[in-house]
Amino acid sequence: TYGEGDLSSIDGVLFDGDVLLAYPAGRDADSYTVPDWVTAIGDCAFSNSNGLKGVILPDGLVSIGDSAFMSSGIQEIAIPDSVTHIGESAFYYSWLTSADIGAGVTEIPQEAFSLCDYLETVTGGENVTSIGDWAFYECRALYTFPYMPELRSIGASAFDNCRSLETFEIGPD
């Protein structure tokens, strides 16, 4: 369950307290700025929002739910440092070209960025300790991936079929 049971709709976007539950998938808008008071993006909240090209996340955001942006049209994402949880398949099969992972993220879960065919660059992630199974599976355009000094675990097929990945630096341990 999410939020406080206080459902509301602002411009067609559904909220439960401080949780964004659902963005209208058929909305004709290029971008959306998540309100500053939102602390969590719910499961599947932006899924199938094909027309949406960009989402600006607030600095106080703590959690991004499972499949939150799955099959969406977003092209860039900057995950704020305040985010400590990214759900499984959060950006699965989206149109991302770049992702900046904030300092609060310690785990990139299973299938988080799988099948993001256009994902070229990942930045940030300095506190990531584990990358889950299939996390970047078939990100065929991915060629830039940051050094993650805290990384200790990489799951099965995490980078399978990342054909453009030129270098991948692992810490001294």
Image (cartoon, grey):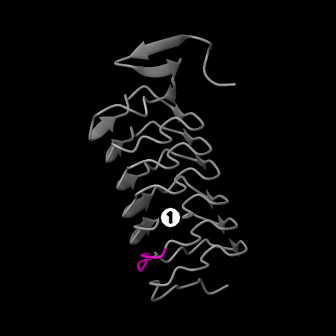
**Taking 116 as reference, is 33 above or below it?**
above
- Relative depth, front residue between 39 and 136: 136
* Left or right: 17 as drawn, with respect to 160: left
Instruction: Give me the residue at 60% from left, 21% from top.
Output: 3
173 is higher (above) or lower (below) than 29: below
Disc 1: CA contacts within 10 A as few (<14), some (14-19) or many (>=20): many
Q: Which residues are magenta?
A: 140-144
- Quadrant assignment, res 44: top right
> In which quadrant is the N terminus drawn?
top right
Q: Is residue 76 left or right of residue 148?
A: left
User: Considering depth in this image, is 113 or 25 the residue closer to the camera?
Assistant: 25
Residue 101, image x, y percentages? 46, 59
Residue at the image point whose x is 44% and y is 75% from the top: 142
Kindly indicate the quadrant of the structure image that contains residue 130: bottom right
Q: Name the residue carrying label 1.
A: 125
Residue 109: image x %, image y %?
65, 58
Q: Position of residue 14 (x, y in %)?
A: 47, 21
Residue 154 vs 124, above or below: the answer is below
